[in-house]
Amino acid sequence: MSHSRIEIAEGDICTQAVDAIVNAAAEPLLGGGGVDGAIHRAGGPAVLEECRKLQGCKTGDAKITTAGNMPARYVIHTVGPIYRDGQQGEPELLASCYRRSLEVAVENGVKTIAFPAVSCGVFGYPIPAAAGIAVDSVAKFLTQDDTITCVRFVLFGQTTFNVFSACHARLKEG
């Protein structure tokens, strides 16, 4: 991770001037609530048009489209797990979302990327557990592939920001 950095920010992922932003999407990739709806609204019809051609996305996987009207070049759509009890493969699927998003990013020449808190909204994943998985998965990927120079977690709300910041601080400590 010597050439890569992880940043934590509170804000609107749709306004990030990075190569790619990640969308916490539902399997059909046709927009919805939360981050997904905000990205589709901000990106405009070009995002939905490309999503329709992708014919959905499986949980734990990721697919890429244009970012349309947003400052980013791409949107990487990933489908996080719906949280039930943490015993139905949710941790592995959530880790896969981050890993697959980064793999798709590297395949498409992305150097800077912004993630939301995948699965923490309507999918109900507890923020402390999700933050640990997110930060650990990204850090692990960056130790194996230093193509991406900056991963920014862009979080909605002070509580989510604080939890991700604490996980990031623990990572930096050791």
Image (cartoon, rainbow, N blue to C red):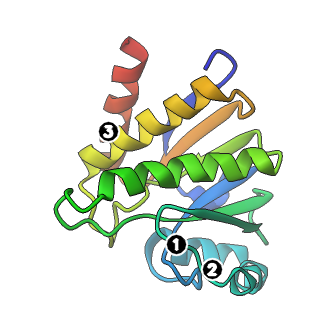
Residue at mark 2: 41
The answer to which of 165 and 124 lies nearer the viewer is 124
In this orientation, which residue lies closer to the viewer: 81 or 92?
92
SS for dot 1: loop
- Number of callouts in the render? 3
Could you tell me which residue is drawn at 34 percent across and 31 percent down?
167
Is residue 88 placed above or below 42 in the rendered structure?
Answer: above
Q: Which residue is mark 1?
A: 58
Nearest to the eye among marks 1 and 3: give it. Answer: 1
Q: Earlier in the sequence, mark 2 or mark 1?
A: 2
Q: CA distance from mark 2 to mark 3?
A: 27 Å
Amino acid carrying mark 2 in the image: Arg
**In the rendered image, which quarter is residue 81 located in?**
bottom left
Give the amino acid type for the residue marked by disc 1 in the picture: Lys
Give the secondary structure at mark 3.
helix
In the displayed structure, does residue 118 sit left or right of residue 57?
Answer: left
